[in-house]
Image (cartoon, grey):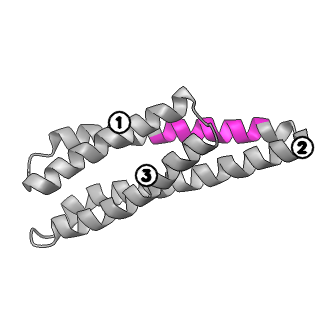
Amino acid sequence: MNPTQDNNQLINTLYHFKRIMHFSYSDACEAYSTLEKHDETTIYIVAQGYLSMSQQCHIELLRIYREKELDRGEIESYIKAYESYIFELKQVITDKDTNTSWLSSAHDSLVEAWKSTDAFIQKWIDNASKNH
C-alpha cells in the first residue's frame, strides 16, 4: 500500500472505532438511566439488555483496538473507565442494590473519559486528513 492508501485506511479505521465506541458508551449510559426510569419489576431486566448490547460493541471495540494497533493512553483511559463502570453496573444488577453511589461515580468517570477520548480520536482524524 502507498502512504495515501495507508492514511485513508487509518482514517476509515478511526471513524469506525469512534462509531463503535459511541455505541458501547451510549448503551452503557442507557443501562444506567433505566435504573431511574423503570419500576422495580423491570428495572434490572431492561438495564441488563442495554448492558448486553453495550458489551457486544465493547468487544468489537477491543478487537479493532488490538488488531489495528490503536494503543494510545487516551484510548486506554476510556477502556479502563468503561470496564470499571461495567463492573459497578453488574454489581448493582446482580445484587439488586439500591445504593448506586459507586455506580454514579463510575458513570461520571465514564462520561468524562468518553468525551476526552472522542475528542482525541477526532483530533487524530483531523490531523490524518490534513496529511492526506
Q: Main secondary structure of the magenta part?
A: helix
Q: Is residue 112 visible?
A: no
Residue 37 lies in the magenta-colored region: no
Amino acid tagged 2: Thr
Residue 95 against residue 104 in the figure, above or below: below
- From the viewer's perspective, tell me whether residue 25 is left or right of residue 105: right
Range drawn in magenta: 114-127
The answer to which of marks 3 and 1 sits earlier in the sequence is 3
Residue on which the image places disc 1: 109
Whole-percent x, y for residue 27 in the image: 39, 59
Q: Residue at x 53, y 27 (%)?
A: 73
Residue 116 lies in the magenta-colored region: yes
Whole-percent x, y for residue 12 in the image: 73, 52
Amino acid tagged 1: Ser
Residue on which the image places disc 2: 4
Residue at mark 3 to residue at mark 2: CA–CA distance: 31 Å
Disc 3, SS: helix
Label ID, residue 25: 3
Question: Label 2 neighbourhood size at 10 Å, few (<14), some (14-19), many (20+)?
Answer: few
Residue 107, by quadrant, is top left
